[in-house]
Amino acid sequence: MPTGLTKEELNALIEVGKTVNAHLDLDTVLESVMSVTTEVMKVEASSLVLVDDETGDLLFHVARGAQAEAVKPIRMKWGEGVVGWVVESGKPAIVNDVANDKRFYKAMDESSGFQTRSILCVPLVTGDRRSGAIEVLNKLGGEDFDEHDLLLCEAVASQAAIAVENARLHRQMLKTERLAAIGQTVAGTAHCIKNLLNGIHGGSYMIDRALVKDDRALLTRGWGMVKKNNGFLQELVLDMLTYSKEREPEYELADVNAINQAVCELMAQKAQDKGVTIRWEPNPHLSQVVLDSKGIRRCLLNLVSNALDACEPGNAGHVDVRAEVFDGDKFDIRISDNGTGIAEEDKDKLFQVFFSTKGSKGTGLGLAVTHKIIAEHHGKISVDSKLGEGTTFTISLPLKRESDFS
Ligand SMILES: Nc1ncnc2c1ncn2[C@@H]1O[C@H](COP(=O)(O)OP(=O)(O)O)[C@@H](O)[C@H]1O
Ligand SMILES: [Mg+2]
């Protein structure tokens, strides 16, 4: 029996090998593999069947030939038809006269309108995992399928099986990574929430005691604690929502000076409590800029709040907010402080979620959220810091005027 491959067949196998190694997506690889197979095996129709991960059903992932579109929606079970037998047994099958083979599944031809005479079917196997089968139907010229065809089809199937297995492993890896990321996020957030709830619990306890003792000073302190932690909790939830959502900036015409002013006013109480001076300077060139003002406000609140945290009491702390146009089509906002500065080894971690050096007082979400919002604006954020001297965060954004949009 002649089983030596012809030059054309060898070329076809090389092409299949190259396609599998080209790192394309699975659908493209399998479509192209089956196109080569149909041509080189000189058959009327072919299909590549895959086991559905969830249901275990056999799905016609690729179908070629006159009735291909009618075949695609059909689902089969393990053991059903020749293809079901091949997947279940893990063995190939040559059926040159379907009328005389019990395994043949007539209903398939009835629903697709195709007339099957002969079938060659080989399983897709990697290790002991059976992931599907390749099936070719009706050799052109009415010849029988032989050992030579079987060899050729098995060579193609071994390559296709690798592609299918690689894709499965890749899906599994992504799922594992996603689960690990979710686990880490849940642990980080739960930790922050627990601290804030402890604060609210402590405040409530004080209020209870104050009510019993009719102590107004204690009542005020307790209520202050509840309000403060409640405010943190709101910030945390807002940051978490911003961080988790894929969003496009909501662009509108805004006044950068007004945003800076609002942020500094909001932070004034915190600054006063710490004896820190906040200064900001208006810039007349930035009173009409197109940006997502809520998003940028959120970033500035995070950056100014961090700058205030970094200022040490009794050290004449100051925080400066300054906006400047540069290169004609960009502007930056700088937030500088004369606080603690950032240690060299922390600089790489600043924008990671949950990185914080503030213990129970930090969430580690502020800079991660800020980075995300700035990236969504196609801008950049950078940091310049010296330990013991202070820190400057600079956000650079594209300068868009209303006229750019008309
Ligand atoms: N202006 C700053 N000066 C010194 N350290 C800073 C400054 N801004 C941020 N950091 C450092 O970056 C860390 C992460 O900041 P952030 O993401 O806002 O989280 P959090 O403020 O909750 O700790 C802070 O814990 C701090 O160590
Ligand atoms: Mg912060």
Image (tube, rainbow, N blue to C red):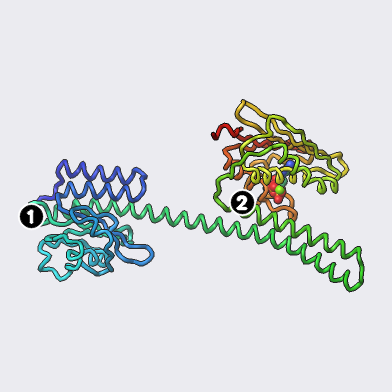
| Residue at 35% in and 55% down | 165
Amino acid carrying mark 2 in the image: Thr
Q: Is residue 110 above or below residue 185?
A: below
Where is mark 1, residue-wise?
Answer: 142
Q: Most extreme residue toward the top, as rendered? A: 327
Among the 4 quarters of the image, the one containing residue 68 = bottom left
- Distance of label 1 from label 2 (alpha carbons): 65 Å
Instruction: Report the disc number at residue 242.
Output: 2
**Residue 333 in view in this figure:** yes
At mark 1, the secondary structure is helix
| Residue at 20% in and 54% down | 46
Residue 53 in picture, x, y percent from top left: 37, 63
Q: Do the residues labelled 1 and 2 touch (CB within 8 Å)?
A: no
Residue 202 in picture, x, y percent from top left: 80, 65
Front-most of residues 279 and 205: 279
Q: In which quarter of the image is the C terminus?
A: top right
Q: Most extreme residue toward the front, as rendered? A: 406
Q: Is residue 235 left or right of residue 401?
A: right
Q: Is residue 305 above or below residue 119?
A: above
